Amino acid sequence: MPEMTATDPPQLPKHKLKYKKQFQRACNEPNEKGKLCGGHLKRWFYLADVLEQACGDVRQAFGDQMEIYRCEHCKTLYLPGPEEPRGRNVAGVGSQSIFGLTLTAKPGEEKEKT
Ligand SMILES: [Zn+2]
C-alpha cells in the first residue's frame, strides 16, 4: 500500500533522504526493477562513519545528534517521521512489568524479649 503522506525531506547532494514511517524497519525505496528494496533500516551513526566524515554534509545539515537510519542495502537515509514518538524504545509497549515483585518485609517480627 504505497501511500505517500509524508513528502520527502530536502535532499543532500550525496544522499537520498526519506522520512521513516512510524515503526518502519524495512526500506520501501523502489529499486531499478520497480520492487521495494526491503533492506533493513539501521541506526546510522554518521559521526563514526569514515566515509561520512570525509563528506560531512549530513553533519552539516543536521548537527551532531540527529537520529538517522540508513538502509543497509541501498544506503537511503531515513529521518524519523514527524509522528515518531521521541525518546521511547521502538520495541513497543508491553514489557514494563516490574509490577508486584517487591517483597516487603513482614512487620512486627522482631523478637526482642528475653
Ligand atoms: Zn533500501
Image (cartoon, rainbow, N blue to C red):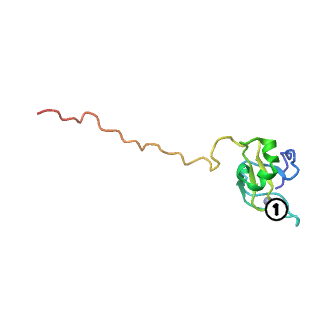
Query: In the image, 3: left or right of 64?
Result: right
Task: Tell me what residue is drawn at x 77 percent, y 51 percent.
Answer: 53
Residue extending farthest to the bottom is 33
**Quadrant where the image shows the N terminus:** bottom right
Q: Amino acid at mark 1?
A: Leu
Disc 1 designates what residue? 36
Residue nearest the viewer, comparing 4 with 13: 13
Task: Tell me what residue is drawn at x 86 percent, y 47 percent.
Answer: 8
**Quadrant where the image shows the C terminus:** top left
Residue extending farthest to the front is 54
Residue nearest the viewer, comparing 17 with 106: 17
| Image spot of residue 81 (x, y percent) | 77, 44
| Image spot of residue 106 (x, y percent) | 29, 38
Task: Tell me what residue is drawn at x 35 percent, y 39 percent.
Answer: 104
Indicate the secondary structure of the residue bearing disc 1: loop
Q: Residues within 10 Å of mark 1 (few under 14, many from 20)?
A: few
Query: In the image, 40: left or right of 2?
Result: left
Task: Tell me what residue is drawn at x 72 percent, y 49 percent.
Answer: 47
| Image spot of residue 20 (x, y percent) | 77, 49
Position of residue 9 relative to residue 72, above or below, is above
